[in-house]
Image (tube, grey):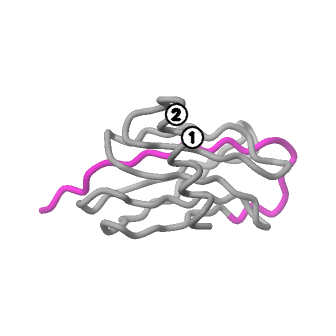
Amino acid sequence: MKKSLVLLFFRVMALGLLPGLVQAQWGGDYLGTTTIDSGNNDIVVQSFRTSVPAVSIQNRSDKPLRCSANFSNGAQFSETRSTTIAPGKRAALAYGVRYITSRVDIQVACSERLHG
């Protein structure tokens, strides 16, 4: 996993994609598009297929981030999961849908967690 994250980092740097060193990786039969709003924070995002649609978010910044992932495929479902990720840590967000009849799009958004 660590090796793949390093490769993702170099792919982002080589292609100059997205501010905040953001990269999405697609896999599986049902994963659609993953869109990312890093909020100009240093994050790494990886979409992956388990028994349910899921996304891993790594916070590479020096401040806590509030991140959410919206899983949707149009008419069948749309569900949002959120978490706060400490600096240097990673979190996985998933949606336990029973069956999927079309591709699942994932929208990831992170912002600096405000205190108070």
Residue range in magenta is 96-116
Q: Residue at x 48, y 52 (%)?
A: 44
Q: Quadrant of residue 35?
A: top right
Residue 56, x across and y down, in percent: 56, 61
Label 1 secondary element: helix
Q: Which residue is mark 2?
A: 14
Residue 88: give x, y in percent of width and height: 35, 67
Total marks placed: 2
Task: In this rendered view, identify the residue nearer to me: 54 or 43.
Answer: 43
Amino acid carrying mark 1 in the image: Arg
Is 6 a magenta residue? no
Say what amino acid the circle numbered 2 marks. Ala
**Residue 97 colored in magenta in the image:** yes
Q: Dot 1: few (<14), some (14–19), or many (≥20) neighbours within 10 Å? A: some
- Determine which residue is flagged by label 1: 11
Label 2 residue SS: helix
